[in-house]
Image (tube, grey):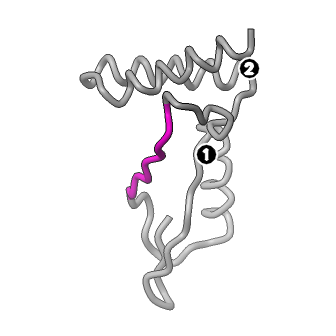
Amino acid sequence: MQESIKTKIQKLLILAQDANDEESQTAMLHARKLMLKHNIQESELVSSLVNNKTVVNERVYRNKLIWWHKRLAQIISHHFRCSYYKNTVDSYQSEI
């Protein structure tokens, strides 16, 4: 049963990458809901269907970081089953 759910999630994630805006958003939403419901991490979905990971560089916040900015990024990334990273621009600015 668990393998069939993983396969379904993988197919939804592939559809989310290939489809138009509305269809891809719906597919991603269904995949995330199934991942949350069955407590499946994205790292468990590695197979021949999904063999490459795409790093999306999207700057969300750029300024002097306060401790809770990092904590908020951790919570959001855990909730959406992805990861975040911090990039230090200079001694006064960082990006999440």
Mark 1 Cα-neighbour bin, 10 Å: few <14, some 14–19, many ≥20 = some
- Give the residue type that dot 2 points to: His
Name above or below for residue 47 compared with residue 52: above
Magenta stretch: dominant secondary structure:
loop
Residue 76 is tagged as: 1
Going 30% across and 19% down the picture, which residue do you hit?
22
Toward which corner of the image does residue 40 lie, by quadrant?
top right
Say if the magenta span includes residue 56.
Answer: yes
Going 60% across and 63% down the picture, which residue do you hit?
69
Mark 2 Cα-neighbour bin, 10 Å: few <14, some 14–19, many ≥20 = few
Q: Quadrant of the N terminus?
A: top right
Image coordinates of residue 74 in percent, x first then y, are 66, 54
Say if the magenta span includes residue 68.
Answer: no
Residue 38 is tagged as: 2
Image: magenta residue range: 50-58
In the image as oriented, which residue stretches furthest toward the bottom?
Answer: 91
Alpha carbon separation for disc pair 2 and 1: 18 Å
Image coordinates of residue 43 in percent, x first then y, are 65, 40
Image coordinates of residue 30 in percent, x first then y, are 52, 17
